[in-house]
Image: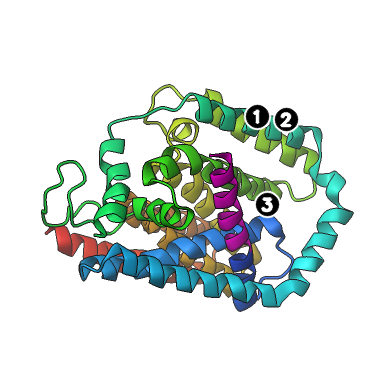
């Protein structure tokens, strides 16, 4: 299983890394670094999956056809990143030159805590009732070759469950399991935590670099505190902090641990840097979050809208409201469609 974990991590982080450089080139985002490339590449992978998966699900397309189409698109995005090797080399040289800044005492403590968290979930896995639905949804996709047409808890052939049909996160790790050649259950419970937990702390690392741009010691302390919060500050299994420690394969757990912090970072970056490309990336992030949970379809416009509105009023910059609304258009379209489905 160690080989499968390593292969999946190389596929995922290598692919999102190069995809991030493709996206950065398209949006003309320079000197953002390796972490930003991986995180932004992840958001693009999720956003593209949402764009492809929703219409294919509605057209009752087979899972195997989805795997082929999505894999081709991801390969194109990944391969395109190789053409921007000069940017990769430039970021690598900067990292090597300033490596001491990223090896503070706080960063080392955070790294040790992250390793402990990965050890904990690998040896003390928690399973809950959601697994009978979401993980089985991934299993059914692989073994029946149907996308959400077979009800995962009974094996019956019902109509779509309108609550979840627009947010099929389990299909993401079903796709990974198909590529790696393991069962979706193993992908979810054993392998996926090794992707989601590091990804979450990459986002916190980006937040720290924004909040304390000149103080690397404080950035390390901030990251260590974020890990401590997720490890020890939760009191029930359904709280946002607990999700990352015990069920990082659940869509709403990824929503709480990755998407919401990423939205915070992107709103902060968009309002401070004041570049149109940041608002585009914020829209991609919001659309990617819609894959995780139907809650994200409604939460993202509210989160962005309230944040941008308050900032625009306080700083007397009403144009930011227009940008904020524009970045929410993909989520708003999905939200309108979601209301149509359940009505």
Query: What's the distance in space between the residues labelled 1 and 2, CA to CA?
Result: 6 Å
Q: Residue at x 81, y 55 (%)?
A: 95
Residue 210: mark in rendering: 3
Mark linked to residue 109: 2
Residue 120 on image: x %, y %: 54, 26
Highlighted magenta segment, given as a residue range: 1-17
How packed mark 2 is, by other alpha carbons closer than 10 Å (few <14, some 14-19, many 20 or more), is: some
Q: Earlier in the sequence, mark 3 or mark 2?
A: 2
Q: Quadrant of residue 62?
A: bottom left
Left or right relative to 91: residue 185 = left
Disc 3/disc 2 C-alpha distance (Å): 20 Å
Residue positioned 54% across, 64% down in the render: 316
Frontmost of labels 3 and 1 is 1
Q: Nearer the viewer, residue 332 or 40?
A: 40
Q: Left or right: where does residue 311 sit relative to residue 210?
A: left
As drawn, is 202 to the left or to the right of 122? right
Q: Position of residue 278 (x, y in %)?
A: 57, 68
Residue 233 percent coordinates (x, y): 51, 24
Q: Which residue is mark 1?
A: 113
Q: Secondary structure at mark 1?
A: helix
Mark nearer the N terminus (3 vs 1):
1
**Labels 1 and 2 touching (C-beta < 8 A):** yes
């Amino acid at each position: 299983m160690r080989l499968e974990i390593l292969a999946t991590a190389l596929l995922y982080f290598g692919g999102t890394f190069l995809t991030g450089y493709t996206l950065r080139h398209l949006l003309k985002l320079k000197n953002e670094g390796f972490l930003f490339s991986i995180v932004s590449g992840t958001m693009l992978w999720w956003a593209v999956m949402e764009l492809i998966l929703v219409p294919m699900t509605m057209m009752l397309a087979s899972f195997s056809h989805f795997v082929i189409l999505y894999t081709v698109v991801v390969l194109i995005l990944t391969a395109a990143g190789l053409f921007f090797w000069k940017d990769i080399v430039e970021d690598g040289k900067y990292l090597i030159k300033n490596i001491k800044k990223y090896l503070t005492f706080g960063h080392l403590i955070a790294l040790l805590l992250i390793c402990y968290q990965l050890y904990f979930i690998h040896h003390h896995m928690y399973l809950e009732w959601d697994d009978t639905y979401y993980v089985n949804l991934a299993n059914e996709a692989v073994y029946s070759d149907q996308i959400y047409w077979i009800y995962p808890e009974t094996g019956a052939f019902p109509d779509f469950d309108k609550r979840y049909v627009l947010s099929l996160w389990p299909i993401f790790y079903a796709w990974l399991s198909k590529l790696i050649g393991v069962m979706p259950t193993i992908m979810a419970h054993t392998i996926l935590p090794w992707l989601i937990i590091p990804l979450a702390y990459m986002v916190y690392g980006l937040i720290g670099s924004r909040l304390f741009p000149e103080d690397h010691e404080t950035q390390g302390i901030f990251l260590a505190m974020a890990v401590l919060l997720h490890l020890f500050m939760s009191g029930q299994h359904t709280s946002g902090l607990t999700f990352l420690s015990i069920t990082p394969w659940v869509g709403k757990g990824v929503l709480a641990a990755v998407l919401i912090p990423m939205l915070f970072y992107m709103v902060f970056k968009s309002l401070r840097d004041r570049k149109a490309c940041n608002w585009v990336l914020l829209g991609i992030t919001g659309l990617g979050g819609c894959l995780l949970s139907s809650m994200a379809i409604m939460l993202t416009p509210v989160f962005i809208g309230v944040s941008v509105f308050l900032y625009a009023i306080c700083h007397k910059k009403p144009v930011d409201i227009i940008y904020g609304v524009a970045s929410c258009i993909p989520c708003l379209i999905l939200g309108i469609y979601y209301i149509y489905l359940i009505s």
